Image (cartoon, rainbow, N blue to C red):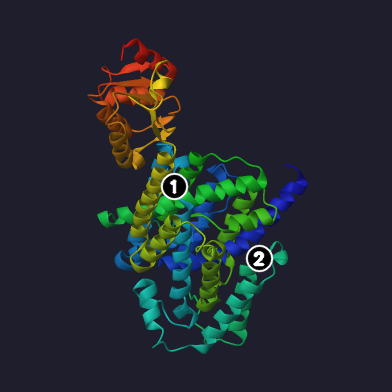
Amino acid sequence: MNIRAIGIDLQAGIVVGIVLGPVAMAYGLISGVGPAAGLYGAVAIGLVAAAAGSCRALIAGPNVFVALVLAPVAAEYGLAAAFTTGMLAGAILVAFAVVRVGRLVAYIPHSLLVGFFAAAGIILVVTHILPALGLPTAPGGAIGNAAAWPGATVNFHALAVAAATVAVGLAWPRRLARYTPGPFVALVVGTVIGAVWFPAAPVVGDIPRGLPSLTTPVFNPSFILPAFTMALICAANALITALQADNLVGGSHRPNRLLAALGVGNLLGGFLGGNPGGASVTTFLNIQAGGRSILSPIVAALVVLLTLLFLPIERIPIAALAGIVIVNGWLIIDWQYLKRMVKIPRGYAAVTLTTAVVAMLVDFNVAVVIGLVVAALVGAVRSEHSELQRLVSLPLPDSTIWPDGDPFESQVGLVVMPDWVSVASTREMARILNRDIAENQVTIFDFGKVAYMDDTAATLVTQVVAGRRVALAGLHGVAQELLTAFGDVSAAHLVSDVEEAKAAIRSGTI
């Protein structure tokens, strides 16, 4: 790395660190563990992921989805429980890496993630209206906070600070973001006008300085589900972010190593009393600012540490942090996808809407589970349609088998199996085949194109051919393995192709 590249990475790291500090504080408030914990978590996770995470441009730290899942745990069980849940999520991430499921986590459907992001954005906006008015967040999530709006007593100083912060955050020109990030400008504007013109706006107040005290874990079985949800969402978000970062900077990350680094970072952060996290949206700010090596993420984490140790962050208005959260909530919603919802196939739209509604009305843990189930069902329906379209079942005229056969009579049927045969199409395929081959004296099953078959489909085939005169043509690979394992095909005639099956029928060996 030359001196110029080092200088660019240093500049990028400083820019990102300036933004990462207030974002970490804001997400600490979202989680319910406080702004200092947000900063501790950003430093711990950021340094570990930068040193060992294999994606050189990725910034790790506060993550809004992790914060939203953690918030109910902190509210119900307290800080020690929240930090323990974060450590448990870190351990699950390490386990993901050990069993090498890094690439598999990236298969979480995009439609589910869009619904998750939309719910998160709406919840962030709705739950931070009260802090923007100078009031504490109400219990009960989005619904509880919305219900508290009508009777809220507005602190107009806080409202002015929040309004200015949101306005600057949304209106800051993109062409200037590389040099002076919008969230940082918004925070400065909100803090300055709060100190000068609106001093009655509540501020962060005293926060712990210096080295954090270590957390003693406290375990409860209730922590397992939110920890797993945090780990799953953290993994999916990190791997997708890393893939996008690689495309932008020409890198190539190692998925399981990245998951292990994030897991260790969350374990360390939890012990230090830090807010858990994952990939940060500031990754793309880092790339935009020119960050291309692990130097910029390390510098960003160190800037956050200096912010914690030396800057007067206790004077920052809570309304300014609420404004930054509202801006982030608005920006993480994929508005382009939502505008296209009327054109998107209904199944995918159902996954998005189901995930979003369940996340807002119940919680994110249940939303992930239900979203995955709905996505699997939608995928199965579409697979069934695709597989059945490629299934061919037709009678063969006798003249195609015997030279003197009647072209208008058929004793033999031909079934050409699709290249992909799965549980999705099994029930309907069985109905079609049993109907079509019922009158055949002999049926030729052509497996020449089959590239994949699952256990349910193999069982179906063995049941359909049982007791019938059949020839299995071109049986090979996984189809042959499964048909042999799940049923008895010894009575069937195995031939290399359809022409050999016809010859065997003519000779009377079938």
* Residue 1 in which image quadrant: top right
Q: Nearer the viewer, residue 130 or 157?
A: 130
Quadrant location of the C terminus? top left
Residue placed under numbered mark 1 in the picture: 263
> Which mark, by number, is residue 181?
2
* Labelled disc at residue 336: none
The kind of residue on which mark 2 rests is Pro
Q: Residue at x 52, y 78 (%)?
A: 319
- Mark earlier in primary sequence (1, 2): 2
Q: Position of residue 111 (x, y in %)?
A: 47, 55
Q: Quadrant of residue 452?
A: top left
Question: Relative to the observer, which residue lies in front, 479 or 185?
Answer: 479
- Vertical relation: 15 (above or below) 232: below
**Residue 257, position in %: x, y?**
50, 40
Work out which residue is located at the far left of the displayed protein and give it.
467
Describe residue 447's horizontal placement relative to residue 307 as left or right: left
The answer to whether 153 is drawn above or below residue 399 in the figure is below
Q: Is residue 359 above or below residue 494?
A: below
